[in-house]
Image: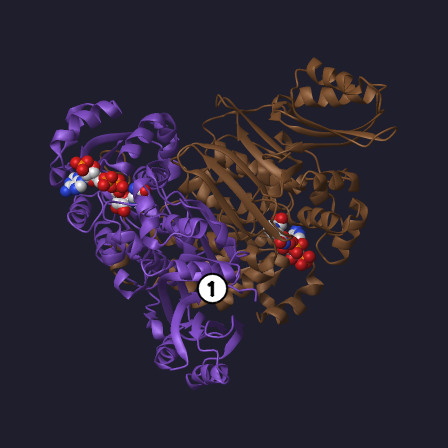
Chain colours: A purple, B brown
Amino acid sequence: MSAGPVLAGPDGRIPDMSAQRRKGGEVMAPIRVGLLGCGVVGTEVVRQLQTQADDLTQRVGAPLELVGIAVRRAKRIPEKAAELGVPESLFTTDSAELVTRGCDVVVEVIGGIEPARSLILSAMEHGASVVSANKALLAEDGATLYAAAEKHGVDLYYEAAVAGAIPLLRPLRESMVGDQVHRVLGIVNGTTNFILSRMHETGAGFTEALEEASALGYAEADPSADVEGFDAAAKAAILASLAFHSRVTAADVYREGITEVSAADVASARDMNSVIKLLAICELSPDGSTIGVRVHPAMIPRSHPLAGVGDAFNAVFVEAEAAGQVMFYGRGAGGGPTASAVLGDLVAVARHKVVGGRGPGESAYAQLAVRPMGETITRYYICLDVAEKPGVLAQVAAAFAEHGVSIQTVRQHGHADDATLVVVTHRAPDSALAATVAHLRTMDAVRAVASVMRVEGDLES
Amino acid sequence: MSAGPVLAGPDGRIPDMSAQRRKGGEVMAPIRVGLLGCGVVGTEVVRQLQTQADDLTQRVGAPLELVGIAVRRAKRIPEKAAELGVPESLFTTDSAELVTRGCDVVVEVIGGIEPARSLILSAMEHGASVVSANKALLAEDGATLYAAAEKHGVDLYYEAAVAGAIPLLRPLRESMVGDQVHRVLGIVNGTTNFILSRMHETGAGFTEALEEASALGYAEADPSADVEGFDAAAKAAILASLAFHSRVTAADVYREGITEVSAADVASARDMNSVIKLLAICELSPDGSTIGVRVHPAMIPRSHPLAGVGDAFNAVFVEAEAAGQVMFYGRGAGGGPTASAVLGDLVAVARHKVVGGRGPGESAYAQLAVRPMGETITRYYICLDVAEKPGVLAQVAAAFAEHGVSIQTVRQHGHADDATLVVVTHRAPDSALAATVAHLRTMDAVRAVASVMRVEGDLES
Ligand SMILES: NC(=O)c1ccc[n+]([C@@H]2O[C@H](COP(=O)([O-])OP(=O)(O)OC[C@H]3O[C@@H](n4cnc5c(N)ncnc54)[C@H](OP(=O)(O)O)[C@@H]3O)[C@@H](O)[C@H]2O)c1
Ligand SMILES: NC(=O)c1ccc[n+]([C@@H]2O[C@H](COP(=O)([O-])OP(=O)(O)OC[C@H]3O[C@@H](n4cnc5c(N)ncnc54)[C@H](OP(=O)(O)O)[C@@H]3O)[C@@H](O)[C@H]2O)c1
């Protein structure tokens, strides 16, 4: 795409030329956009490119021209073309060819690792900037994509990969880049949020709530990426990478899904005036030398701002040294909202093609290590069925003490054979808390560990 | 700063050179930063430049070098220099000279129209990109600053001007730029939010609550910019400009402050299970041809997410066609939070100096006209003291009907001489609502119009 030589000034910096370029007022050649995938998100991208065409032209400084749409199944092309009002000839099943057609920008909304990765790399090699919504790929192998973008001098943007329509990555990557982020905490998966909400509302167990979610289209045919926490873990890896300028992959993330959350856990939460949410948490250690990245269900007080976040919504808190706490809230998924984020990125990278410049590349200079979950400082809620005998509380307390875990509150319910001890701990290393639970399970005085749940925020007790 | 010729490719586009530049791995010349003003915000900017120096170098790709700090009062320099641990020689009272010293970036945190504007223009003329926190100037004359930035090929960033630490302008300007924004609505002034909160908590009148705010340092010596709504109006103008790609100045904004909000209004709100907040509202008309921009107190239901926004916090909703509703929440003012936003901008514009490129310029292509407040569609809450005579309600209802205003709910309280009618209208042009109120005031049956307040959100009744 480039030809003439470009020379930096004597100070080694590149003079900016946009003013002199725009002055001419010449009509710009269109920006050629290739679209990979035309499913839930891709369809909305095409729609918005159509309905917003004039505005996008103004905002980019040149028209956006859709040069091809790659899908997998040829037989669905006529229907899609008709639905979107575009010629069938715009569609192709040869995605590998589309990315070599001299696109200025390739939008990847296929999902999954392959062929998405190869297609993106090939697109970059052919000079295209890339906009992707692919959290799985970014979290597994973002470094490879960034390196290719760097090598070929193109942009890599992926706002839509985390929290759908909510501007979150750009604020982290750019607005808060002058500050030190301490913590990112949020609800980033709508399916699990729906299921947990239903469990709270109806008292249903996990399986029943999942069935309802599937029936209502809130869960995919194979729900494991959501309910096992893989989707949230990928997002957590991306958030941690950006917040802490370190390379964090999905494999680095401690991950517990919601499949083990029981109706009893939910009832326990209700007794504590709390709710259970699947949280993604990325934290800097107090000395700033390591980071913790985890996804797990947690009990949070009803008064916590995340407690009220409903079904399809996502909400993320970012805590930074100077900024304090900032919260972002909005629709975390769905074709329209996700396409909104894709289009924002598309305008940004297309503008760069028009006026020059590039967005931030990978920033992993801090190279902070991810500490194991065992070293992460957490708090537990533990509900025990115990024999109502004198001395039981003392034995239980001794078990906590043995592992160096101090108890914040303990409450005893019931009498005779049916006593329950509800313990909320102070903060301690997760390994010590886990060891305490394991120890409790072996004690004669403890009939059963009825419920164990990590706690975030201050439970009222 | 530039010297060598720069040639665009045959397609008229500028090839990106950042990859080839960074490859050399050479140490970059420092980015020279001039700071105008060292008060609440400036002091924190200097602090963060110091404590974050290594990280900022990595994130920018070159060290940031503070080349001078301009203040007004020479006699305070020794104290400031000592407090910040920087040499006194770094300070100057000659701000006009500082901006001609070949700065790469000038940070303007003086405030007000002059000399801030002249200094910024001079800085740009001398090749500096500008980061400003100056909402008053941006709202009054942003177009002049943008034109100068365009002419001299430099950046103009001002994230800190609206909603302090909350990333809001960049999301609007960049993340949501592929979408169509319909509405921006929020709480953007902390002082008035504190005063209104106190009025709700204690039942105090405006004057009393203002005194308390002053005593606690929440209000400035001259509080008029805040309580008369000028500060919020400037922010509304900036938000509307960015959201609707049109030039909107502070003078275009319909503005009502909180000085007329009475203890009776607050009591009325309480009766309606509502609170009064000073809102900034920017809206596209339903046909997309005009915009409304206004700042006024409004009654919102307690269940509204803005109802719970406390003292020093700001919260802003952005509603867009595809994204749906997105919310941003955080600290709206204070030295640290505001400096966080300034530093984010500083990193962005400094990066552009290092790797080339420029941020978005003015985007006012849509040129939408601002419609008069009278044509804006609003809803009113009206509380009337009426004579308890047969036929009063019919007379009152007739007055509404005469102005084409339809009533959503009406409630009658009390008996005998002391009856009260509480009316909540349906949506109608503000001029029709205002005319209705004026008419009611002239009616014999109406002893007094005890309270009138615009309504946002759905009041429960
Ligand atoms: N859906 C959401 O709410 C959401 C939210 C945020 C992020 N995302 C991300 O956005 C991406 C797309 O999600 P989606 O929900 O739109 O997926 P989808 O509905 O399953 O659509 C996938 C599209 O990719 C096409 N495709 C599959 N393999 C292909 C191949 N080898 N070559 C060319 N095209 C191929 C499919 O073709 P056929 O039409 O022929 O099947 C389909 O059009 C994923 O990375 C997802 O994680 C989605
Ligand atoms: N404070 C906040 O929370 C906040 C939040 C968002 C945005 N802002 C914006 O940030 C800007 C600065 O606010 P601030 O609260 O930091 O104000 P401030 O505390 O009053 O400080 C103003 C600084 O500017 C200096 N100054 C005044 N006139 C000058 C001149 N002619 N030449 C050089 N320096 C001059 C002052 O010098 P002396 O020190 O000698 O007086 C002082 O250092 C304003 O635009 C404000 O609207 C502030």
Q: Is residue A25 above or below residue B319?
A: above
Q: From the viewer's side, name the closer residue of A16 and A228.
A: A228
At 70% from the left and 54% from the top, the residue drawn is B218
Q: In this view, does A229 lie above or below B237?
A: below
Q: From the viewer's side, name the closer residue of B52 and A86.
A: A86
At 21% from the left and 36% from the top, the residue drawn is A34
The chain to which mark 1 is attached is A
Image coordinates of residue A459 in percent, x first then y, are 53, 64
Residue B39 sits in quarter? bottom right
The residue tagged 1 is: A456
Image coordinates of residue A243 in percent, x first then y, are 39, 60
Say few, some or many: other residues with alpha carbon within 10 Å of mark 1 (under 14 / 14 to 19 / 20 or more). many
Residue B236 sits in quarter? top right
Q: From the viewer's side, name the closer residue of B374 and B63.
A: B374
At 63% from the left and 72% from the top, the residue drawn is B82
Image coordinates of residue B399 in percent, x first then y, are 74, 16
Amino acid carrying mark 1 in the image: Glu
- Specify whether tag 1 is near ligand 1 (CB below 8 Å): no
The tally of labels here is 1
Q: From the viewer's side, name the closer residue of A321 and A105.
A: A321
Q: In this view, does B10 lie above or below A185?
A: above
Q: Is residue A225 visible?
A: yes
Q: Quadrant of the N terminus of chain A?
A: top left
Q: In which quarter of the image is the C terminus of chain A?
A: bottom right
Q: What element carries label 1?
A: loop
